[in-house]
Image (spheres, rainbow, N blue to C red):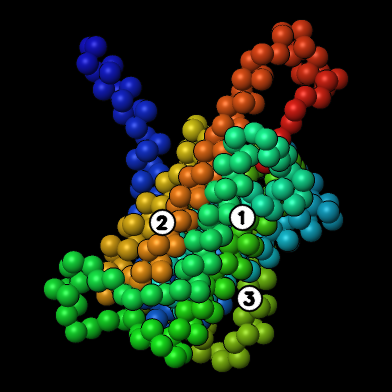
């Protein structure tokens, strides 16, 4: 009985780890499948439309079932917040990310996405949602981490370097490679793709900052907020596609890789992952969830070398290492900040806590 109890306790405590590792495999699969689809000529504008149409179809029924009661009123300011969130996420972020993925590689794109915590920190400081005290070690860690992350991104953008062959690449793809030369047009496309990925990450970090305000209204209706974002984002993406793509044939989709890419991205990475990641964040916190993101980069690098014969370049390796170091420095600073808030809450005497609960005492409150 004692062994059974220990085993069940271990399995329960291991669930968040298994969940986050599984999510990284899911995200990695999305990057590989999407890259294959883009290489075969699918428009990334159309892919964004279909992806979020699938996501809306999956999330909306759950929102109607579980969050039907006491829905917040959609006033004009609330609608504009959701409209802006949809524009930043489904439209700007996804289109620039897919364009960057098309011009670079899945591994490179995943490495760039690790800049997200650092960029979100910068945006939060700019909009005064983050208090910065340079005398404290946790703030210094976040500043240094942000600087190192930016340096890594700049290195990856400006320096490609020689290709580094994987040990198994020559045996699996001896004569064939999906990666072109490092000169001429390829270098220009690589630089263009890097800029697109940076813009995508900026849009996503802006979404996180704006979402903080929106969640004040939809605190208990997160599925509803997500389904509204996906639905409005789908309509916006359709409008953008009509402007950017003038051939009706781009909308054609059959039982092929294009359909798989749209369905996989919409169902797995925009629906299932939302629920799973939300549960993990609720139990272990956002720092725990974000700490697994470099694992996706490693999985994509291995899968990409097998499936796409992807070459990894020296500049990308060095830049990725710098970004990961910066990422964990920022996460460490956020973790220490959270611990300080918890400790300060525990030090508040009971009578003062009671006053705080009644709303007559406003302590140190952090929105980010």
User: Which mark sits nearer the N-terminus, 2 or 1?
Assistant: 1
Disc nearest the viewer among 2 and 3? 2
The residue lying toward the viewer, choosing from 182 and 303, is: 182
Q: Residue at 76% across / 7% down in the picture?
A: 351
Disc nearest the viewer among 3 and 1? 1
Q: Give the Cα separation between the discs numbered 3 and 1.
A: 28 Å
Q: Give the Cα separation between the discs numbered 2 and 3.
A: 38 Å
Asked whether, in this view, residue 111 is left or right of residue 358, the answer is left
Q: Is residue 253 above or below residue 338?
A: below
Q: Is residue 223 above or below residue 298?
A: above
Which class describes the residues within 10 Å of circle 1: few (<14), some (14-19), or many (20+)? many
Which class describes the residues within 10 Å of circle 2: few (<14), some (14-19), or many (20+)? some
Q: Position of residue 153 (x, y in %)?
A: 52, 64
Residue labelled with disc 2: 321
The residue lying toward the viewer, choosing from 334 and 183, is: 183
Please tell me in which quadrant of the rendered image residue 241 appears.
bottom right
- In the picture, the disc for residue 238 is 3
Q: Residue at 50% across / 72% down in the picture?
A: 157
Residue labelled with disc 1: 119
Which class describes the residues within 10 Å of circle 3: few (<14), some (14-19), or many (20+)? some
Query: Can residue 259 be seen from the camera position used here?
Result: no
Are the residues flagged by discs 2 and 1 in contact, CB closer than 8 Å? Answer: no
Asked whether, in this view, residue 254 is left or right of residue 334, the answer is left
- In the picture, the disc for residue 300 is none
User: Which mark sits nearer the N-terminus, 2 or 3?
Assistant: 3
Q: Is residue 26 above or below residue 355?
A: below
**Element on which disc 2 rests:** helix
């Amino acid at each position: 009985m004692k062994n059974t109890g220990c085993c069940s306790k271990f399995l329960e405590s291991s669930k968040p780890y298994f969940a986050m590792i599984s999510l990284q495999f899911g995200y990695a699969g999305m990057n590989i499948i999407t890259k294959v689809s883009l290489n075969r000529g699918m428009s990334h504008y159309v892919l964004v439309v279909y992806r979020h149409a699938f996501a809306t179809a999956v999330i909306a029924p759950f929102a109607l079932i579980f969050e039907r009661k006491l829905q917040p009123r959609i006033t004009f300011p609330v609608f504009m917040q959701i409209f802006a969130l949809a524009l930043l996420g489904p439209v700007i972020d996804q289109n620039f990310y897919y364009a960057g993925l098309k011009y670079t590689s899945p591994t490179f794109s995943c490495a760039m996405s690790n800049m997200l915590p650092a960029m979100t920190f910068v945006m939060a400081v700019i909009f005064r949602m983050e208090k910065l005290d340079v005398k404290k070690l946790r703030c210094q860690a976040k500043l240094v981490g942000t600087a190192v992350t930016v340096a890594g991104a700049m290195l990856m953008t400006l320096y490609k370097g020689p290709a580094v062959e994987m040990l198994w690449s020559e045996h699996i793809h001896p004569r064939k490679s999906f990666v072109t030369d490092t000169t001429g047009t390829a270098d220009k496309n690589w630089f263009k793709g890097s800029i697109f990925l940076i813009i995508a990450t900026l849009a996503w970090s802006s979404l996180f900052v704006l979402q903080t305000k929106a969640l004040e209204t939809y605190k208990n209706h997160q599925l509803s907020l997500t389904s509204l974002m996906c639905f409005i984002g789908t309509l916006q993406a359709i409008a953008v596609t009509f402007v950017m793509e003038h051939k009706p044939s781009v909308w054609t989709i059959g039982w092929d890789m294009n359909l798989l890419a749209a369905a996989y991205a919409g169902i797995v990475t925009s629906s299932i992952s939302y629920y799973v990641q939300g549960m993990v964040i609720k139990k272990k916190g956002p720092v725990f969830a974000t700490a697994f993101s470099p694992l996706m980069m490693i999985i994509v690098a291995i899968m990409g070398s097998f499936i796409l014969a992807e070459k990894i370049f020296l500049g990308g390796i060095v830049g990725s290492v710098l970004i990961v170091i910066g990422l964990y420095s920022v996460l460490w600073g956020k973790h220490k900040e959270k611990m300080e808030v918890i400790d300060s809450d525990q030090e508040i005497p009971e009578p003062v806590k009671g006053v705080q609960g009644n709303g007559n005492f406003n302590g140190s409150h952090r929105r980010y």
